[in-house]
Amino acid sequence: MEAFQFDWDEENIRHLQVVVNRPVDLGTELRNDEERTAQVGETDAGRILIGVTTMQNRKIRVITAWPAKERFRRYFQTQKRNGNVGRVEKQDLQE
């Protein structure tokens, strides 16, 4: 499996955690001639955000992120309980 690099700056570095903490893909659309993927995920502090990313020059770039509305928070929490998404807690690594 090929590893991807991230392209970030001061504006989007805070939102990077959503992408690396095993988010749930919500869909992809073509916008401004680039494919953008929306995801719901969480920060290390546990905030659940919607993030939008794109691939540029073989790097993942976070375009924007904002707090998830209630229905997306519930959806994410359900998926996390199933064990397939979300940040990995220290106690999960010890099992």
Image: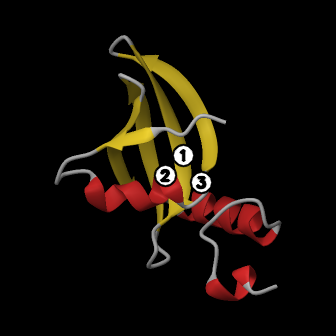
Amino acid bearing label 2: Val
Residue at the (19%, 48%) spot, across then down: 9
* Scheme of colours in the image: secondary structure
In the rendered image, the residue lying farthest to the top is 33
Question: Can I make out residue 66 in this image?
Answer: yes
Q: Which structural element holds mark 1?
A: strand
Q: Are marks 1 and 3 in contact (CB under 8 Å)?
A: yes
Q: Earlier in the sequence, mark 1 or mark 3?
A: 3
Q: Is residue 2 above or below residue 88?
A: above
Q: Which is closer to the viewer, label 1 or label 2? A: 2
Where residue 6 appears, x then y in whole percent? Answer: 37, 43
Q: Are marks 1 and 2 in contact (CB under 8 Å)?
A: yes
The answer to whether residue 14 is left or right of residue 25 is left
Residue at mark 1: 39
The answer to whether residue 27 is left or right of residue 35 is right
Q: Earlier in the sequence, mark 1 or mark 2?
A: 2
Q: Is residue 60 above or below residue 80?
A: above
Q: CA distance from mark 1 to mark 2?
A: 8 Å
Q: Quadrant of the C terminus?
A: bottom right
Q: Quadrant of the N terminus?
A: top right
Amino acid bearing label 1: Gln
User: Which labelled disc corresponds to residue 19?
Assistant: 2
Residue 23's image quarter? bottom right
Q: Are marks 2 and 3 in contact (CB under 8 Å)?
A: yes
Residue 90's image quarter? bottom right
Where residue 65 appears, x then y in whole percent? Answer: 36, 51
Residue at mark 3: 23
Residue at the (19%, 51%) spot, across then down: 11
Residue at the (66%, 61%) spot, across then down: 76
Amino acid bearing label 3: Pro
